[in-house]
Amino acid sequence: MKKMKVGLIAATPLLGNKEGNLKRIEKLVKQANADLLVFGEMFLTGYGKNTRWNELAEDLEGPSLKFVSKLAEEHNKYIVMGCPMASKDRVYNSALIFYPNGKKGVYKKNYLPSFGLFAEKKSFSQWKGIEVFDLEIGKISLCICYDAFFPELWKLAALEGTELMICISASPFQTRHYFETVLPARALENTIFVAYVNLVGKQDDMFFWGGSQVYGPRGNLMVKAPYFKERIDYAELDFGEIEDAKADRPTLDDTERWHFEELSKILGDRQNRTGSSTTF
């Protein structure tokens, strides 16, 4: 049965300084000992309220992304990292996975928060869809921060076969309780592993709490890092546990399509009534 060692890298990026952050990434990749390494949301650029995302964004062949891809090849590791990505005159809040063989995979944030401290709809384009990346060491999906609060997205990934959902985040300390409430529920209701990696420290007037966490397919807490500390934590995942968890609580097998059909109808009616772009 497949096993995976995941390295959760809670660190503070330099705001707007890609060159400096690439040096940090290189140092941490050399230091960490895992099959797959995970950095937080927008780690390439930092996450600030006044960051000029459109000026910092790169496409898949940009120099920064080529640099990280080369690191993955040289050190024979998978690397997950958040960054602003340019594509067809649009900018997306993205999570990239770099393969040891030079391949790249991309997930673009589906749900853009535009409330409180956040105004992502002004800076980024929305993406609709989830990916399952079939790695030699397991099937994984990626999501970004606010995506954690939309269970239908996770259910879709689980039904398509994902074994591990990696959630990268730029979560200020005011929102910590929300994540620590929903993440174990997402693991339990989908019988998958969940790994969460957050930024650490101050960016503009936001303070990120770090606190990397991993949950097993029964919602059990496997790893919980201290808050507000830069560090690398590790989790050993045995995907054989997923089949045992599914036997105990077969939520995916028992999922019925009528719920989704009804949800689609309700959201469609709302769109027609209000003009909202929200669709399912």
Image (spheres, rainbow, N blue to C red):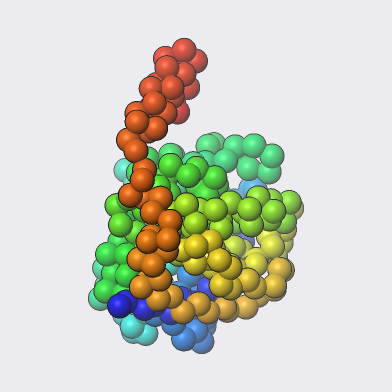
Furthest residue toward top: 273
Q: Nearer the viewer, residue 153 or 95?
A: 153
Q: Which residue is rendered at x = 36% and y = 43% of the image?
A: 255
Residue 145 visible in rendering:
no
In the visual, does 197 lie left or right of 67? right
**60 left or right of 193 in image:** left
Tell me the quarter of the image containing the N terminus. bottom left
Image-based side of 27 in relation to 225, left or right: left
**Which residue is at the front of the view, 272 or 252?**
252
In this view of the protein, can residue 146 be seen by the observer?
yes
Provide residue 99's location: percent of width, then percent of height: 31, 72
Q: How many marks?
A: 0
Front-most of residues 205 and 276: 276
User: Residue 204 is drawn in which quadrant?
Assistant: bottom right
* Residue at 56% from the left image edge and 58% from the top image edge: 184
Q: Is residue 80 above or below residue 131?
A: below
**Residue shown at 54%/45% (left/top)?**
149
Residue 209 placement: quadrant: bottom right
Could you tell me residue 124's position as x and y percent? Answer: 48, 42
Location of the C terminus by quadrant is top left
| Residue closest to the eye, 31 or 86 | 31
Q: Is residue 32 above or below residue 41?
A: below
Q: Is residue 133 above or below residue 278?
A: below
- Residue 226 is situated, as x and y percent measured from the top left of the image, at 70, 72
Q: Position of residue 49 (x, y in %)?
A: 65, 48
Question: Which residue is found at the position 34% from the left and 59% from the top?
Answer: 162
- For this orientation, the residue located farthest to the front is 248
